[in-house]
Amino acid sequence: MTVAYLTNQYPAPSHSFIRREIIALEARGNTVLRYALNYREVELVDEGDLAEKAKTKHILRQKSVDLLAAFTRTVIRHPLGTMRALGASLRIGFRSDRGLIRHLAYLIEAAIIADWCSHDQVEHLHVHFGTNPATIALLAHVIAGISYSLTVHGPEEFDGPRSIALSDKMKSASFVVAVSSYGRSQLKRWIDPDQWPKLQVVHCGLDCDFYPDRGHDKIPGPSFVCVARLAEQKGHFLLLEATAKLRAQGLRFRLTLAGDGPLRKRIENRITELELDDIVHITGWLSNEGVRAEIMQSRIVVLPSFAEGLPVVLMEAMAMRRPVVSTYVAGIPELVIPGTTGWLVPAGDAGLLADAMRDALSEEPEEWSQMGRAARQRVLERHDVTREAEKIERLIQVAIGRNVLS
């Protein structure tokens, strides 16, 4: 089976779950091609990401003459489909906050993807994220009849489903994947009930890097790590408020912010304002190995998110026997069991977050170890990438009319 994966940015530090899914599908004997709009060179520090970059065809990295040739071939092959796609692009663009010009660009990119799929003999196109790559997949479907599906993660898709024409994308897709039951519930709001059967839950998975269980039970010093892009929805400013509260109570600990992002300068300024420079450290972008090292060196993983899908870093931390502190947001309560694998607090409350962090630091070694063992067991049962890739494979086989053994 030959499948193409389409994303906006690939590879990327925060998209390791896509890489794992692709590799797991390939391990099952499938050919998986990587298509993407672009990548950010500065963010690529992981060897796996660098290897994926070489395997990925990026639209915005192609020569203009090659893009023009691909677009022209598609128009010649599918003139009526291209006209229908133009109408769809205008209709979606009028409703979108991204405007008509951007959607005309999506039309061009869709024609290029249609040409690539034809040349590479792609049987099915799968998209991660319901934003602009899903728009491109929808338009490629209208142009050339390419079957496609999409994985919707959230929270971006749930913030403005009308403006991104999420209903149209789901209606035309062969199937739609949510990464949690919560995510599927949100998708059900934007599609007719008679199409609910096409909504499936497939979890993001962990690979063999997280299967060994060596050294995970060693108790580090009093420390937290927050592994997240430095962006609005991750709650870093709230985390700094909670950290300042704990510091005022006389607790001694350190906090590592593993990652980078658009809010880095403002977060650095806030660290200084709260006089936390001596206990809070920002790492910048890390490789997967670097992230695992930070998790191993910390006692507790904390993620005070305001909006989420289902954070992969919580799965990774739990697989490494680290209890977690997070929020009652989106799919997180489906993974984290309060009192058993970690602590959950209402999003946005710095006081309750500080209380949970204090409780986490004060856990006795045996209780900490027991929570870590329970966390690892839960995540390995629910997020094995081979098992989850098999689910995707079977859905694609049904979509393209392959015989599937039950």
Image (cartoon, grey):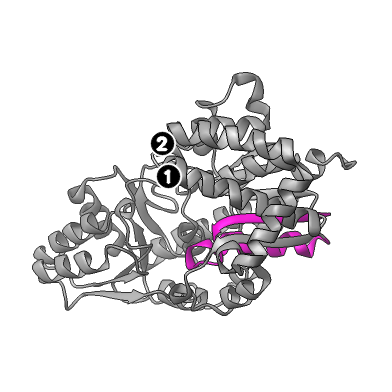
For the N terminus, the image quarter is bottom right
- Snapshot quadrant of residue 81: top right
Q: Residue at x 56, y 53 (%)?
A: 378
What percent of the width, then of the height, locates residue 385?
66, 58
Q: Are marks 1 and 2 in contact (CB under 8 Å)?
A: yes
What percent of the width, then of the height, locates residue 262?
31, 63
Q: Amino acid at mark 2?
A: Gly
How far apart are the two marked residues, 1 and 2, measured between alpha carbons? 7 Å
Q: Which residue is mark 2?
A: 160
Q: Label 2: state its secondary structure.
A: loop
Does residue 231 sit above or below 212 in this rendering?
above
Apparent side of residue 283 relative to residue 68 in the rendered image (left or right): left
Any part of residue 196 in sight? yes
What span is in magenta? Answer: 1-29
Q: Nearer the viewer, residue 392 or 334?
A: 392
Q: Amino acid at mark 1?
A: Glu
Q: Nearer the viewer, residue 274 or 12?
A: 12
For the C terminus, the image quarter is top right
Q: Residue at x 71, y 50 (%)?
A: 114
- Mark 1 crowd level (few <14, some 14–19, many ≥20, 10 Å Cα): some
Apparent side of residue 337 relative to residue 21 in the rendered image (left or right): left
- Mark 2 crowd level (few <14, some 14–19, many ≥20, 10 Å Cα): some
Any part of residue 392 in sight? no
| Image mark for residue 156 | 1
What percent of the width, then of the height, locates residue 240?
20, 61
Does residue 367 sit above or below 74 in this rendering?
below
Q: Label 1: state its secondary structure.
A: helix
| Image mark for residue 283 | none
Q: Nearer the viewer, residue 242 or 160?
A: 160
Q: Is residue 261 magenta?
A: no
Q: Residue at x 71, y 56 (%)?
A: 4
What percent of the width, then of the height, locates residue 7?
58, 56
